[in-house]
């Protein structure tokens, strides 16, 4: 996957309305966005994804968390899978050939398996302790991230507790992109905070 964006934004229902969040993230310049609503049914997620697709810029990509069926029906750019979700090869049978698949990994072994599964990107983390998950996996730290990045061919999206103060260290480990949730969505002005992030990591 060429030209992977440095900033991987996430509209997360835990922090409010994902559609409103997406509008602010897009306004701030985000162009790769995952829609996450783990507690909603498929119909609700589909409606939210469709609403977000209507406001997405022409060069924007919208990824659906967990639900390959919603990604297919909505025409989203692809799906993001967790370790307990549908296996990537099964999701590939559901999706259109042009739709992409990302997978969360928390260990070197999981990352190597995802690399062999030919996913389009591998999310790795948490890099640092995070508060956005109820029972997060242990933080792998910069050294763990560096090791994984050196062993896989697939673009790595680093996630978990990453701040604007640590992002350049994270990118220096070999990550293609950083996923940011709290630092963007908890900001009083999500659009402006997105702009700050993009200016900070521009050129990496």
Image (cartoon, rainbow, N blue to C red):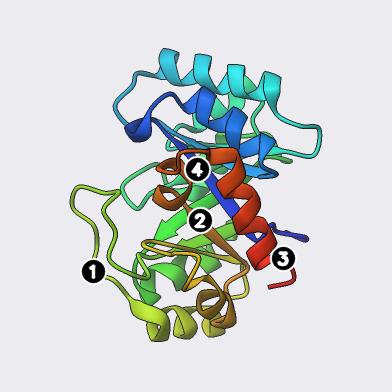
> Is label 2 or label 1 in front?
2
Up-down relation of residue 144 to residue 7 (above or below): below
CB-based contact (under 8 Å), mark 1 and mark 3: no
Q: CA distance from mark 2 to mark 3?
A: 15 Å
For residue 73, say whether it is visible: no
Disc assigned to residue 138: 1
61 vs 128, left or right, is right
**Circle 4 SS class:** strand
Q: Is residue 170 above or below residue 75?
A: below
Q: Residues within 10 Å of mark 1 (few under 14, many from 20)?
A: some
Name which residue lies at 41% across and 81% down.
142
Position of the C terminus, as image quadrant, is bottom right
Q: Residues within 10 Å of mark 2 (few under 14, many from 20)?
A: many
Is there CB contact under 8 Å for labels 2 and 4? yes
* Number of the label disc, if any, that sits on residue 179: 2
Disc on res. 10: 4
Nearer-N-terminus badge (2/1): 1
The alpha-carbon separation of the residues under discs 3 and 4 comes to: 19 Å
- Residue at the image position 35 percent from the left and 65 percent from the top: 126
The circle on residue 202 is: 3
């Amino acid at each position: 996957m060429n030209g992977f964006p440095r900033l991987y934004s996430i509209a997360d229902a835990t922090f409010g309305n994902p559609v409103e969040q997406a509008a602010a993230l897009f306004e701030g310049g985000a162009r790769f966005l995952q829609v996450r609503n783990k507690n909603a049914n498929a119909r609700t997620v589909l409606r939210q994804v469709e609403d977000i697709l209507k406001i997405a810029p022409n060069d924007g990509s919208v990824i659906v968390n967990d639900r390959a069926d919603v990604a297919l029906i909505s025409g989203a750019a692809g799906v993001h899978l967790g370790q307990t979700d549908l296996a990537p090869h099964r999701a590939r049978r559901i999706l259109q050939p042009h739709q992409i698949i990302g997978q969360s990994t928390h260990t070197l072994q999981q990352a190597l398996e995802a690399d062999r599964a030919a996913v389009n990107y591998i999310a790795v983390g948490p890099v640092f302790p995070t508060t956005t998950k109820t029972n997060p996996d242990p933080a792998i730290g910069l050294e763990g991230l560096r090791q994984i990045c050196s062993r896989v061919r697939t673009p790595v999206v680093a996630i978990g507790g990453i701040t604007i103060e640590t992002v350049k260290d994270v990118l220096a480990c070999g990550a293609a992109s950083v996923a940011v949730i709290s630092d963007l969505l908890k900001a009083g002005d999500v659009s402006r905070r997105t702009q700050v992030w993009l200016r900070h990591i521009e050129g990496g």
